[in-house]
Structure formats: structure tokens, C-alpha cells
Image (cartoon, rainbow, N blue to C red):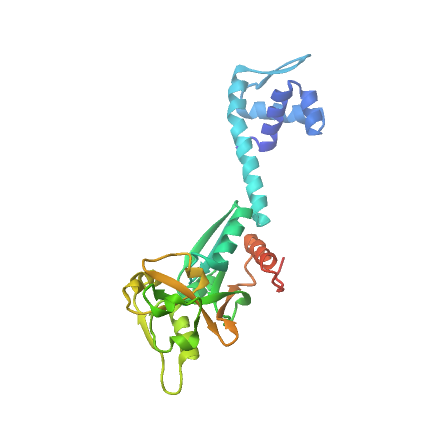
């Protein structure tokens, strides 16, 4: 374009103040600088924008049309600059989070809701997939941070424990254990467990094998090619039980109830960890990490 945004700002200021002198004072520049730039602007557009007199300046008919058109341009430019500054400080832009567990309740949901409430300008996109897919997304830079069950190290990623959640057994409402407030691991040795073959089903299976295997007997675990929602939906028919973490208990299914599982040391807990690349330059990720450390009183350090 044959003119720049500064010249447009000068013209609007002159129109608003009705005087080159008063506009220059408001902009804290020399009057000669303002008048010279407005003259360049008039030459660039090919017509006078102002009528000049001893009492000040008045927009010409063409000038009124021109000024009406450039005001939205200046406002858009200001908005764009503000957006870029906010994005550079992590107060805007985008954040892509990966997970393979339910977010109907629990710490992950509460953290995401708290972040959105305090950072509404940052668009959060959640990716739910199996662990391998999420880690590949991290490696490719398509995901900023992934939150997964457990704390397995992966080359190239920072891994930090975040929080723990209770484990619960999902039972048919007609099950004898439905009368109890808690269920112990030892109570579950004779049960048939239905788990999804997709994540986090295999991790739940490994937990059950570690807790319930005795001598040569292993628990009855069936991995189904169904979603966890489908499995929980059919439990009310009495076909078995399932294991869930606290994050799944916000969703309710017909004739299905949840009961906390206890072990020898009290409530059964499972930990969750966050994974991200140290070379990720997204400022929103750094602000999110700071938000998590403050919200959950976590001691780990990260690049500011």
C-alpha cells in the first residue's frame, strides 16, 4: 500500500481533534511531523483529506469517506497486535492436550475447567487416543502435552507425575457388593472383569493382574473391542464388573453403581503423569504448566 498505519492514525487524530496542533499534542509528536505525514497520505490517495484554515482542519467530502473506511482498519490492526502480544505471553493462541482417559469427572476435568475459566483467550483442543498415538503426536509437535496413567519414561519427552485418583469398581446395582460402602481387592478375586481393549483397558488389566493373581490362578479378565462407555452401559445386565478411575464417574449408566476399592493401605490409587517436549516453544504450554504446578502444589521446575 502507498501509505502506512501510522499515517492513518495521524489522519484520524487530526479529524478527532479538529486541529493538527491538538492532534500532535495528543500523540506526543511534533506538529510538523504530523502535518508532513498527512500531506504524504493525501498525495498517496490522490485527493485532499482535510480543508485547512486558521481555526483548524475539517475533513473534505472525500476525506469523510476515507476516514470512515480507515477506522475499522486501525481497530483491526490494534486487535491483531494485542492478539499477537497475548499469544507471545501464553495468554492467547492455542493449546493441544492429549489424554486416553475419561474426563467426565476427576482432576483432569477440574484442571481443564479451571484453566478455561482463567484463560478464556486460549483455545484448548483435546485429543483422545491410545498412548502410542498421543506420544507420536507429541514427537511430531502436533500435541503440546499429554496426560496419561502411570509414569513411564519416554526418550525425548519430559515426564512429571501430576496427581492421583481413586480406583473404583463399576457394579450392577443388583450385585451383592452394591450394599457396601467400599470393596476390597480380595473381594474381587472371583469376579469377571470387562475392560476395553483400547486404552486405558490394558493398563487396568495389568493392575488387576498385579493385585488379584494368586499362585497359579489369574483373574477372569475379558478385553472387549468396545468403548468404555459401551462396556459400562451393559454392566447393568449383570454380565460382569469393570474397573474405572475417578475421572470416569461423572457419567452415569442404567443400573450401574461405583464403589471405591481399598487395599491394605487404604484407598486404591492410580497416578497420572504429564508428558511434553522440552523444546516446545508454545508460550501457552508454559503458562499451562505454571497453572498446574500452582493448582496442585507440584514442586517440579520448567522453563519459564
Q: Is any atom of residue 119 visible in this view?
A: no
Question: Which quarter of the figure is the C terminus placed in?
Answer: bottom right
Q: Nearer the viewer, residue 183 or 30?
A: 183
Residue 186 pos. (x, y %): 42, 78
Residue 77 pos. (x, y %): 55, 35
Residue 220 pos. (x, y %): 33, 77
| Residue at x-position 55% and y-position 42% | 83
Left or right, 35 with reference to 213 = right
Question: Picture quarter containing residue 2?
Answer: top right
Farthest-out residue, front: 179
Q: Nearer the viewer, residue 87 or 247?
A: 247
107 vs 215: above or below: above
| Residue at x-position 38% and y-position 75% | 188
Q: Nearer the viewer, residue 265 or 300?
A: 265
Farthest-out residue, bottom: 215
Residue 203 pos. (x, y %): 41, 71
Farthest-out residue, top: 54
Left or right, 132 with reference to 255 = right
Left or right, 302 with reference to 105 = right
Q: Is any atom of residue 266 visible in this view?
A: yes
| Residue at x-position 51% and y-position 49% | 116
Total number of numbered discs in the rendering: 0
167 vs 26: above or below: below
Q: Nearer the viewer, residue 87 or 35?
A: 87
Amino acid at each position: 500500500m502507498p501509505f502506512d498505519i501510522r499515517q492513518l492514525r495521524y489522519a484520524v487524530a487530526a479529524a478527532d481533534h479538529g486541529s493538527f496542533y491538538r492532534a500532535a499534542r495528543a500523540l506526543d509528536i511534533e506538529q510538523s511531523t504530523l502535518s508532513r505525514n498527512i500531506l504524504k497520505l493525501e498525495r498517496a490517495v490522490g485527493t485532499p483529506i482535510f480543508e485547512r484554515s486558521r481555526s483548524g482542519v475539517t475533513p473534505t467530502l472525500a476525506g469523510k469517506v476515507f476516514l470512515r473506511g480507515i477506522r475499522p482498519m486501525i481497530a483491526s490492526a490494534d486487535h491483531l497486535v494485542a492478539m499477537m502480544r497475548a499469544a507471545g505471553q501464553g495468554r492467547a493462541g492455542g493449546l493441544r492436550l492429549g489424554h486416553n482417559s475419561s474426563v467426565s469427572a476427576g482432576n483432569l476435568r477440574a484442571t481443564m475447567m479451571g484453566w478455561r475459566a482463567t484463560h478464556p483467550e486460549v483455545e484448548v483442543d483435546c485429543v483422545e487416543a491410545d498412548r502410542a498415538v498421543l506420544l507420536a503426536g507429541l514427537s511430531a509437535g502436533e500435541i503440546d502435552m499429554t496426560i496419561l496413567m502411570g509414569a513411564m519414561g519416554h526418550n525425548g519427552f519430559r515426564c512429571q507425575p501430576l496427581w492421583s485418583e481413586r480406583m473404583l469398581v463399576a457394579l450392577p446395582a443388583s450385585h451383592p457388593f452394591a450394599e457396601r460402602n467400599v470393596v476390597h481387592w480380595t473381594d474381587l478375586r472371583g469376579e469377571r472383569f470387562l475392560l476395553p481393549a483400547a486404552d486405558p483397558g490394558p493398563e487396568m488389566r495389568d493392575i488387576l493382574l498385579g493385585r488379584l493373581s494368586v499362585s497359579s490362578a489369574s483373574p477372569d479378565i475379558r478385553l472387549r473391542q468396545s468403548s468404555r462407555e459401551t462396556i459400562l452401559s451393559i454392566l447393568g445386565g449383570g454380565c460382569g464388573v469393570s474397573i474405572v478411575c475417578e475421572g470416569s464417574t461423572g457419567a452415569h449408566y442404567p443400573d450401574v453403581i461405583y464403589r471405591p476399592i481399598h487395599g491394605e493401605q487404604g484407598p486404591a490409587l492410580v497416578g497420572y503423569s504429564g508428558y511434553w517436549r522440552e523444546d516446545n516453544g508454545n508460550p501457552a504450554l508454559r503458562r499451562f504448566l505454571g497453572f498446574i504446578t500452582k493448582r496442585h502444589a507440584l514442586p517440579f521446575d520448567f522453563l519459564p
